[in-house]
Image (cartoon, rainbow, N blue to C red):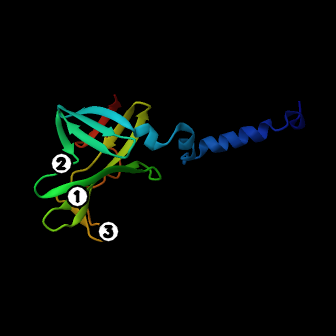
Amino acid sequence: MNIQQLGFIPAILLMTLFLLSCRDLRWLRGLRGSVEKKLSGEWEGTEGGNKWSFIFNKDGSFMAVMGNDLVFPPTSDEEFVVERVSWEFDDTQDTIHLDCIVFIKYKESGETQRVVLPFIIRFLGQDKILIRTEKAENYIIDDTTSPPTMYLFKRPTGFVAKSEGQLILTRQ
């Protein structure tokens, strides 16, 4: 059997080998479904004996609960009103960036502020994710945005073997 009898088989094999060897396979994400679709729902995990629940709703709202206590977003009080909450992701990054965002309005001044809880996430399977945030000494304020943005934590640059602020969540 000579090469002409094989036809397009060698070309197809070479193209397949090339595509599989590419490190950047982001285009496959479109075939497997968007991050938004995969992340929507309720996720639970445990860190330091505390049960955590993260709920990412399809309407863009979210909640983070520790035990039976709502941790984020804050509830309106005598100082401010929570105007809206949302979650956004950036899957063009090497680790997916996830921001949980709250827009608050201070009652006394009338000023609005964007409060961001930044995470990185990695899907470990269809029903498991690894999520991490990194505690900062102080809040990080960015006055160049409108409205001004307060980052509650520093976004980590990657995952580590074991870390406070990193946990595995399972879809409920």
> What is the three-letter code of the residue carrying label 2?
Thr
Q: Nearer the viewer, residue 94 or 46?
A: 46
Percent of width and height locating residue 115: 25, 57
Label 3 close to label 2 by CB (< 8 Å)? no
* Secondary structure category for the residue under label 1: strand
Nearer the N terminus, badge 1 or badge 2?
2
The residue wearing badge 1 is 104
State how far apart marks 3 and 1 are (Cα).
Answer: 15 Å
State how far apart marks 1 and 2 are (Cα).
Answer: 10 Å
Q: Nearer the viewer, residue 46 or 37?
A: 37
Percent of width and height locating residue 143: 26, 70
* Secondary structure category for the residue under label 3: loop
Q: Decide if residue 99 is in sight here.
A: no
Q: Residue at 15%, 68% (x, y): give it.
A: 109
Q: Residue at 31%, 71% (x, y): give it.
A: 144
**Residue 124: quarter of image:** top left
Q: Nearer the viewer, residue 84 or 119?
A: 84
State how far apart marks 3 and 2 are (Cα).
Answer: 24 Å
Give the label on residue 145, or none: 3
Quadrant (top left, top right, bottom left, bottom right) of the C terminus: top left
Label 3 close to label 1 by CB (< 8 Å)? no
> What is the three-letter code of the residue carrying label 1?
Ile
Residue farthest along the left direction in this orientation: 78
Give the label on residue 139, or none: none
In the drawing, does residue 148 fall left or right of residue 31? left
The residue wearing badge 2 is 75
Percent of width and height locating residue 138: 17, 59
Nearer the N terminus, badge 3 or badge 1?
1
Nearer the N terminus, badge 3 or badge 2?
2
